[in-house]
Image (tube, rainbow, N blue to C red):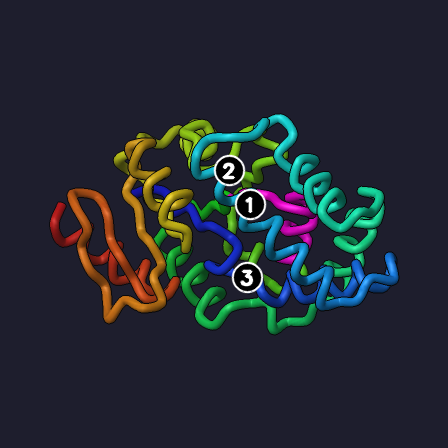
Amino acid sequence: MKLVSFDVWNTLLDIGAMISSLSKGLGEVTGIEEKETARGVTLTRERIKGMRSKGVGNPERALEESQELLAELLGINVEFVKRAAARAVLRVGDEIVLPGAKEALRDVKRRGLKVTVTGNVMFWPGSYTRLLLERFGLMEYIDRTFFADEVKAFKPMKEMFKKPLKTFNVRPGEAIHIGDTKSEDFEGALRAGMWAVWINPEAEGVRRVGERGFEVPSVEGILEVLGRIKRDS
């Protein structure tokens, strides 16, 4: 194994904390009750994830589409979504870093592997997520970040997974991706020829799933997975 790719949201960072901060910001800039903005964000997020799992949507406008759909649902100008996203990034605290995330990145990096982040975008640009990773000390262990609005593709599209492989001249069978969304992260990585790890909080432990797949209860499970692959090779 030469490269480990990490999803961001609900893998390294807590999407719930970010959405709460975004919903609060939306309420402030629009005057809409926060419970209504939170409902709008949740419904729009579910809609977009459903679209992407089916390959629907314009990868060239992955960010803009999500912002516009949220603005449409709430009946506001898209500029308010952009302002609220900026406020969210400025205000969210260190509770956004998931337990074990920094340790997992650090220990993978110590094994001499290339470490990347491969993330979709929704409501805020990848540059904002990169800022959060930097702000809370995670970028110290990450070699490169690949976000949908910059790659012009989104998971589970093969192009999204192939970009880091091409950047580091790594074959698909020499790379592994870990994330919390089965359709986007696990199935997308497998279709790209990579090894794949699905974070399922209900899993009782690390479990092999098929030829190149694993299920783990948390991000730290990547370390045991890497150990198993090494022993079996």
- Residue at disc 2, secondary structure: helix
- Residue at 44% x, 39% y is 53
- Residue at 26% x, 35% y is 173
- Residue at 44% x, 59% y is 105
Q: CA distance from mark 1 to mark 2?
A: 6 Å
Magenta residues (range): 119-133
In the image, residue 198 lies at what x, y percent? 33, 54
Left/right of residue 117 with respect to residue 113 in the rendered view: right
Q: Is residue 9 magenta?
A: no
Frontmost residue, 14 versus 75 = 75
Dot 1 and dot 2 residues touching (CB under 8 Å): yes
Dot 3 and dot 2 residues touching (CB under 8 Å): no
Left/right of residue 198 with respect to residue 38 in the rendered view: left
Number of on-image labels: 3
| Location of mark 1 (residue) | 47
| Location of mark 3 (residue) | 13
- Quadrant where the C terminus sits is top left
Q: Could you tell me the amino acid type at mark 3?
A: Leu
Q: Could you tell me the amino acid type at mark 2?
A: Met
In the image, residue 184 lies at what x, y percent? 42, 43
In the image, residue 70 lies at what x, y percent? 70, 46
| Location of mark 2 (residue) | 51
